[in-house]
Image (cartoon, rainbow, N blue to C red):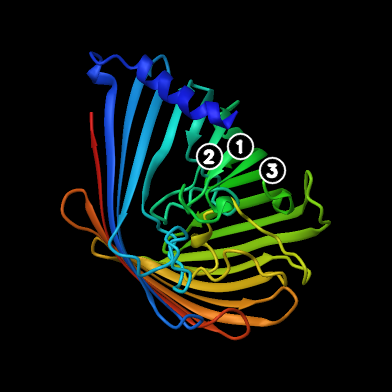
Amino acid sequence: MSRLLLPLCIALTLQATPVAATEVMHFDWNLRLRHESVDDAAFVRDADADTLRLRAALRAELGRGWTALVEGEGIASAGNRYNSGANGQSGLPAITDPSGAEINQAWLGWRGSRAAGTIGRQRILLDNQRFVGNVGWRQNEQTFDALALEASPTADLKLRYYWLDRVHRIAGDDALDPLARERDLGTHLFNASFKHGSQQWVAYAYLHEDQDVAPASTATHGLRWSGSHAGSALTWGWTAEFARQTDYADNPLQFAHNYWLIEPSLQARGITWKLGWEHLGGNGQHALQTPLATLHAFNGWADKFLVTPAGGLEDVSVSASGKIGKATWMVAGHDYHADLGAHYGREWNLSLAAPLIAGWSGLVKFADYRSDSFARDTRKVWLQLEYVGSRP
């Protein structure tokens, strides 16, 4: 089925978009230049990647709620001083930004006042992307061949369902490991959210079947509550989430792991302070996993916990963020333990982002992981320029 979704959606887009109807055509593009360096004590040599990504999309508003989109992306790299997953440089630290070009999205969608649907290769973001996201930080994002359905019976209630047929992973089509390129799925995602004032409740069931790697198939059921309360000088916020993950479909393993997140926040004098306690259960042989998530956004930017260790993970964090003029800054600290008690290590993250001239933005970002009993000491630095444009 997935082999038919992409060509079908491209054909429908081109056929349904008359050249004369220029008023319904939109051209969007994104240019991102990035330098990333990695100093990982597990390797003799450091890694450096200088990559340039161009993403361009043709979007057609077809009338009566119909929209079609075709988007391609290309990534170029200056040299092979890093392990991209496709260049064979296994003796260097990994920076998963391989060179290449591919169709990133190609979908046909309809949206009405109370319902919507999309079929084709598409970007999917659910809640904070802890379980399903697009890994937008990497140059080659993660997209899905999928059917998406949405209904809003009331203004406050949103019901969403996704059938995922295939995931196209960040390692790209030329990854040396075929399983790092894409996976055949039979995944069903259910997500129901209710908003009332400044609070939101979400219930979800993510039934993930990986048809290429059976032990990766899981069923995750959870509840999420978030909100805020504004006072005269302070704004309090909170997020509380609990989920239970079990084996699913043809998974030969048997397990049941708990997930929870408790994250209170306080905003005062232009600074937002957050405390976090995130728990991913493990039993020493297997642990809760989130293979479809935007993993870089969680458990530190050094990316030491993209796969949850078999002993599980406890991440206790504190962060502060705010603005200096138009620039946005953030500082965060993490302390990592196993679910079973061992101390993994600590990490500091810092970032500074600012708009530049029209359409351009800049970013400086730093991660410093200090190992106790898991992985090795690692430092990462990023320098980035990005341009976003659109033209009807």
Q: Is residue 84 left or right of residue 250?
A: left
Crowd around label 2: few <14 · some 14–19 · many ≥20 (10 Å): many
Crowd around label 1: few <14 · some 14–19 · many ≥20 (10 Å): many
Identity of the amino acid at label 2? Phe
Q: Confirm or deny contact between disc 1 and disc 2 (CB under 8 A).
A: yes
Q: Tell me the residue at 81%/58% (across/down).
A: 255
Q: Mark yes or no: residue 236 visible.
A: no
- Give the label, 1 or 3, closer to the camera: 3
Identity of the amino acid at label 3? Gln
Crowd around label 3: few <14 · some 14–19 · many ≥20 (10 Å): some
Could you say where residue 16 lies in the image, as x and y percent from the top left?
37, 15
Could you say where residue 218 lies in the image, as x and y percent from the top left?
73, 50
For marks 1 and 3, give the CA distance.
11 Å
- Judging depth in this view, the residue of 108 and 172 nearest the camera is 172
Residue position for label 1: 164
Residue lying furthest bottom in this view?
A: 372
At numbered mark 3, what does the secondary structure look like: helix, strand or loop?
loop
At numbered mark 1, what does the secondary structure look like: helix, strand or loop?
strand
Q: Classify residue 83 by image quadrant.
A: bottom left
Q: Which numbered dot is residue 144? A: 2
